[in-house]
Amino acid sequence: MSHPYIYVVITLLTAAAVAFLMTPLVNKLAHRINAIDIPKDERRMHRHPIPRLGGLAIFGGFITAVFVMWLLPDILVVDWTMVRLLGGTTMIIMLGLLDDVKPLPAWPKFLVQISAALLVVLGGVEIERFSNPFIEGAYVELGMWSIPLSVLWIVAMTNAINFIDGLDGLSVGVSSIGAMAIFIVAAMKGNWQIALLMAALTGGALGFLPFNLHPASMFAGDTGALFLGYMLGTVSIMGLFKLTAIVSFAVPLLILALPLFDLIFSSVRRIISGKSPMAADRNHIHHKLIDLGFSQRQSVAILYGVTAILSIAAVVLAVGDEMRALLFLLAISAVVGAIIWVVVTLSSAKKVIAEELNAQEESAEENA
């Protein structure tokens, strides 16, 4: 491919422009079909109805940019892997649309997500092996576990982005940073097929983001969150897990660490408390930041920063000197882990103190 960065710029700008121009139209459609998010409980941060379906604009920008690249000769290769990927994204978009109009039960949603994941995995998009960090040049072959673990990764990422979709601009911004990190690694490795896909995804997300930042005039909805998660999960297998670096398995984990951490932490907490892992609550990492007194914009900025730091670590790990990259990775992981632990601990302590004060006030009122 001659002058690849020119095509990257065209792809990104096309996706961003289409998504930006589509958003007002999608907004009208959301009102017409009553795809409106009405605040009904304390876990929602907005106080008035806001239309969702913004994911349609993100997808519109993405698919338009991909189509433009297809029209140019020898830019994007039209193969069965790409066809399966677009087929899977279509399934996810339809699922998100239905869920945004009328919330669906968890298990039917899981079945569709698993089907969309299987569509690409059975077409060859699978984690076949990863490098052994303890033995240079050695690999851990997954064998029969390749397909189920690949499906699990894609479904987990699909839901992880949806889990952090709790503050204005959070899921879309975090996904943009993750997509940019994957783009950088793919470009530096010369994998322009993956790089262009991530440029299209980044452009679509950035084109919608101005409408989604606080105070948001539109939400991405499940349509957007599920689409972004599915794309990041699938393309990370196509690109990042195929690296030959000694710690290649850590690269996608680092880039997508924040949503994955929130998914695992929330699911384990709910299971321990006897609830369904898919039961909604107000105990996500972004809620913890709000409880500590940060505003929506400050909370989102903090989580953008954490994602950016982890993504930089991943890029260094993927393309830099392995020993230096590994030391950098350990240092960054320790710092980020400490920050998250402090946030969760302080938030929980503040909540306990507030409950005790309320109990004391109620007791004092009763005694009076």
Image: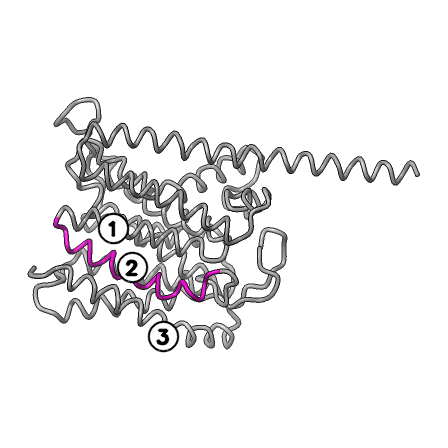
Magenta region's main secondary structure? Answer: helix
Q: Earlier in the sequence, mark 1 or mark 2?
A: 2
Evaluate if marks 1 and 2 touch, with contact meaning CB atoms under 8 Å apart. Answer: yes
Q: Which residue is the site of mark 3?
A: 21
Alpha-carbon neighbours of circle 1 within 10 Å: few (<14), some, or many (≥20)? many
Q: Position of residue 226 (x, y in %)?
A: 39, 55
Using the image, determine if residue 89 lies above or below residue 60. Answer: above
Residue, x 24% and y 48% (percent of image)? 121
- The answer to whether 331 appears left or right of 301 in the picture is left
Query: Is 211 in the magenta?
Result: yes
Question: Hey, which quadrant is residue 237 in on the image?
Answer: top left
Kindly identify which residue carries mark 1: 235
State the extent of the magenta-drawn residues as a range: 190-213
- Picture coordinates of residue 204, whole percent (x, y): 32, 64
User: Between marks 3 and 2, how big is the CA–CA gap?
Assistant: 16 Å
| Nearest to N terminus: mark 3 or mark 1 | 3
Label 3 amino acid? Leu
State the separation of the CA atoms marked 1 and 2. Answer: 11 Å
